[in-house]
Amino acid sequence: MKKVLFITYHFPPDASVGGQRAFKFAKYLPEYGWEPYILTTDYTGDGLDASPLDGIKQIKIFKVEALPGLRDLYLRLKYLFSKTPNRAAEKQNRSSLEGENFLGRLKRYLISLTVLLVDDKKNWIAPAFLKALMLVRTHKIDYVVTSGPPHSSHLIGLALKKISGVKWAADFRDPWTDVLDFKPRQARCALSDKLDRVLEKKVILGADKVFTTTEPLMNRYLERYKGAARKIRLLTNGFDAKRFSPDVKPRYARFTITYAGTLYYNRTPEPLFKSIAKLVSEKKIRPNDFAIKLIGNCASVDGRPVAEIAREYGLGNAVELPGYLSQSEVLGIMRRSHLLLVLAPNQPLAVPAKVYDCIASGTDILALTDEGGTKDLINGIKAGCCFSHSEIDDISRYIHESIKSRTTGVPARTEAHKQFDIRVITRKLSEELS
């Protein structure tokens, strides 16, 4: 068998969605003649779920510890010496630099160039590179695949390519420089933006293959890097059909809307709360008629507790915040729900990986998103409806119609859904690497 080494910062038991793509590929590549090796971090934080690894022995996993860095020191000092932040002022500073003095500008440049350039995970580059070089030479690795974000993983691949000559594919789960405008302003400066663009160019031109997960991002790179067009490929995310138990319970008695993921990057359930509160005020539904499950890291939005926001809209008893659950539990809840909430604001080039599990569940999707990859995908296979965050009346109308037409039967996948089975996509990866 040929040997492939995945370099990915996230990997089970780290429950972060960023580790699922490499894991699914590694799980099924042996069926197509590839022996998978994984190089990842020794993750010990919140959100651990080792259940995906149960019964899987063909994946060889190696771990390294990231070196302590300036970011750790900065956060520690900030925690020790800063007063409780003013949320309104902090929110204003994220979008505007008006009134910034010389010391503020100097601080912004230092942080953006030393702490946040590329990303805040770059302290793993040195130990990961040394370990990867050893693995490439000891195990005679045929291909290296780096997974980003964090995009510092691609710099490891770039260095391996130059030093060892091993074939290397850069896998972009999300854009790199195209999201700079959405970063907090105090985390950026003109020089750091320029350096990020230089590094992105070196990665894309230096890799043997470049994979993107969405057609909009692939087209952006084809336009920007015309000299690399022959090696830029679309390799979407997908769902693992084996993870969906055939023994599915009926849908919940109460109309249930479920979100699974993290509330960050301007993701907020507040438009959903507004829409449901509108239906309650119009006496079209009663507060006890429905439930909203927010699973994962969903306790707060921009520092505000989600439970507090729910109470402001009179939905305190309807909103459930169970925290992290195992994958099998989450997938079971998704199939028993009546609607699945997708939050993808300001992501024209990306599709959240969790969307593919939503598609696989067969449950209708309510997506709060803008024009771009997520809307194109959901509309293209008729998996649900998409609205912008401001279309409260339309969201309310869709929820009301869904409540009136709800069924108790088990949701079913359609033929259109099956193109996103991860085994189909893994076969495409195998063909590209071969």
Image: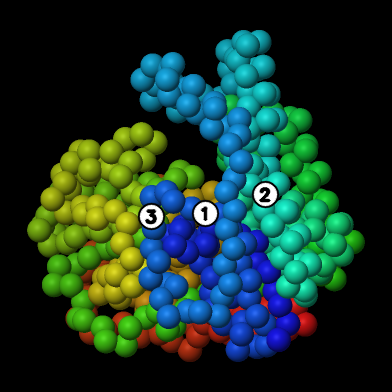
Q: Quadrant of residue 350?
A: bottom right
**Where's residue 98, x and y in %?**
58, 17
Amino acid marked by disc 2: Pro
In the structure shown, which secondary structural element does the residue marked by tag 2 occupy? helix
Image disc number at residue 227? none
Amino acid marked by disc 3: Gly
**Where's residue 301, x and y in %?**
36, 40
Residue that mark 1 sits on: 42
Q: Quadrant of residue 25?
A: bottom right
Residue at image point 59% right, 53% down: 64
Amino acid marked by disc 1: Asp
Residue that mark 2 sits on: 127
Nearer-the-camera pick, 232 or 283: 232
For the residues labelled 3 and 1, the Cα–Cα distance comes to 13 Å
Task: Please tell me whether mark 2 or mark 3 is closer to you in this view.
Answer: 2
Q: Is residue 157 above or below residue 56?
A: above
**Where's residue 14, x and y in %?**
46, 58
Pointer 1: residues within 10 angstroms few (<14), some, or many (20+)?
some
| Residue found farthest to the front | 138
Residue at image point 59% right, 21% down: 97
Evaluate whether residue 181 shows in this view. no
Nearer-the-camera pick, 293 or 114: 114
Residue that mark 3 sits on: 47
